[in-house]
Amino acid sequence: MIGSLRLYAAQSAAAIRTSFSDRGNFAIQVGGMLLNDVFFLTLWVLFFAGFRSIGGWGLSDMALLFGLTMSVVGVSGVFFGGYRDMAATLLRGELDALLTQPKGLISRLLVRESIATAWGDLAGAVFVLAVFAKLSWSDLPVLLLGIAAGTTVYVSAAISFASLAFWAAGARSFARDLTDFTLLFSSYPGSIYQGAVKAIAFTILPAGFVVLAPMGMVRHPSGETLGLVAFGAVLHAGIAAALFNLGLARYRRGASPSM
């Protein structure tokens, strides 16, 4: 396990250095993402300046939601950037070379890329959480735990969607659309989700476990909220591993779809 973690750390560091290689392009991408995040934050600040609350949610709650979302996207992009286009990697047949290497196929697919714009999300997340979310230093451990759990669910969902490429040649755009929609679904106040929509948010598109459940744990830490967050992370990681390995068995039999 320690050896695998060291290998992943080395590969991740190499991917990050590659994303830094073109300093000008890196700065433009990070700056552009920061501007994008500031724009959306400004919209919410103006909204709550006029309406004060929505469904019991105030600016600090929305800032926590927004900050957690940016943190999840930032951590995922910097350290697991290969999730973004994993379906395309499978469809291009790039898996063949990786199959000859030691175990840890999913981790090697995830570490193939580090997304430069994700650094902008991380910087924006730190600012939003520190200034607007009304958190204290005592909240930091549970906040980091929530980010780790949300990242696990988000990346796991992306792997599950990408695994559709083992069965369908058109899965590349579909997998990315599902991943993007999960993120979009995560970025609205939880009070708007009711009935069937709420069920979808915690199952098919696990937006509830990406941000809403971790947010509940940060605001109201307890054994119940911690258990819910841990359950979501373990469940979706298990689903992702099962779907990927099921598809991989089919791929090895030469039945993988072509582009």
Image (cartoon, helix red, strand yellow):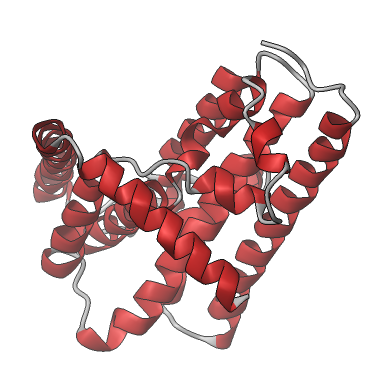
> Which quadrant is home to the C terminus?
top right
* Left or right position of 63 against 223: left
Q: Residue at x 18, y 44 (%)?
A: 44
Above-or-below relation of 7 to 106: below
- The single residue placed furthest to the right in the displayed view is 253
Q: Residue 152 or 255: which is nearer the viewer?
A: 255
Please name the residue shown 79% across and 50% down the image: 242
What is the number of callouts on the image?
0
Measured from the top left, where is residue 63 in percent x and y?
Answer: 23, 57
- Residue 73, image x, y percentages: 37, 48
Q: Position of residue 75 (x, y in %)?
A: 36, 56
On the question of residue 187 being in view, the answer is yes
Quadrant, the N terminus: bottom right
Q: Residue reaching furthest top?
A: 259
Left of 228 or right of it: where is 17? left
Could one spot residue 214 in this view of the protein? Answer: no
Residue 121, relative to residue 218: is it above or below? above
Q: What residue is drawn where x is 45% and y is 50%?
A: 80
Where does the image place residue 23, in percent across and percent down from the top left? 11, 38
User: Who's the residue at 13% across and 33% down the image?
Assistant: 32
Q: Nearer the viewer, residue 43 or 207?
A: 207
Is residue 90 or residue 233 the one in the foreground? 90
Q: Which residue is at the front of the view, 197 or 69?
A: 69
Against 141, residue 251 (above or below) is: above
Q: Quadrant of residue 136?
A: bottom left
